[in-house]
Image: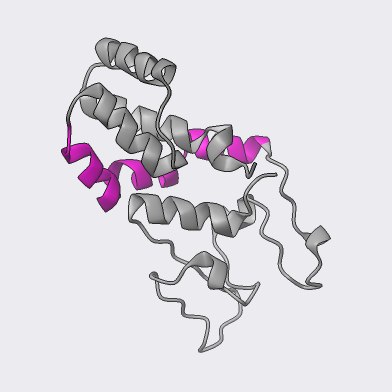
Amino acid sequence: RRMEAEVLIDGLCQITGTTERYSSPIPEPFTYVPETNRTITLADGSITSAFLELFGRPPRDAGLLSERNNRISTEQRLHLLNSSHINRKITQGPKMQALARQGGAPEEVAKRLYLTFLARYPTEEEVSRFKEYLAASVRPQEAFEDLAWTLVNSVEFLYRH
């Protein structure tokens, strides 16, 4: 099953070293949420973001599991593949920039990214494909970002097994 919206955005933020902003249509003095708070801790269903709405976070009116929609939609796929939101996290996130600055051999770069995103080492075939892509790519930075983006969109990252 696919990760819940809150878990997915928390994971992306933790991996990239970025934060999210939340808003609430209900103007109460307690709706301010510090950017350092994890999404999973948001108790009020009215405090939300565009990402949470797109990825099926329920309003929590009834508290039933059936309120949540965890099926991946075309809009969600397009957001993960094309959005400036995810692009900024990968290209400008402090943790991603620190990983990219480490450089090294293609095997080491692939190893760091796979460990970061999937918590496992890449297979020989995955390293080989990355090397081929790197050889055909314009810049090593682009290849690094493309591999990170590929891992974000992988079934292994998006789904619980």
Task: Answer whether residue 87 is visible to the viewer in this image.
Answer: no
Q: Is residue 15 magenta?
A: no
Image coordinates of residue 84 in percent, x first then y, are 41, 42
Question: With 116 as the anchor, is 80 left or right in this view?
Answer: right
Residue 4 position, x and y percent, is 63, 54
Q: Quadrant of residue 21?
A: bottom left
94 drawn magenta: yes
Return the residue nearer the eye: 156 or 21: 156
Please name the residue shown 49% across and 68% down the image.
Answer: 22
Instruction: Using the image, determine if residue 61 lies above or below residue 111.
Output: below
- Identify the residue at horizontal 71%, vertical 48% (top origin): 70
> Which residue occupies the foreground of this view, 17 or 103?
103
In this rendering, would 130 be left or right of 29? Answer: left
- The colour mode here is one colour
Q: Quadrant of the N terminus?
A: top right
Whether residue 102 appears in this view of the structure is yes
Determine the residue positioned at 42% across, 34% down: 149
Instruction: Give the magenta part as a residue range.
Output: 74-103
Up-down relation of residue 65 to residue 28 (above or below): above
Q: Position of residue 30 (x, y in %)?
A: 52, 87
The number of numbered discs placed on residues in the rendered structure image is: 0
Note whether 25 is above or below 144 in the view shown.
below
- Magenta segment's dominant SS is helix
In which quadrant of the rendered view does residue 134 lie?
top left
Residue occupying image coordinates x 52% and y 81% = 31
* Position of 133 relative to 26 (above/below): above
Quadrant where the image shows the C terminus: top right
Left or right: 49 in relation to 160 = left
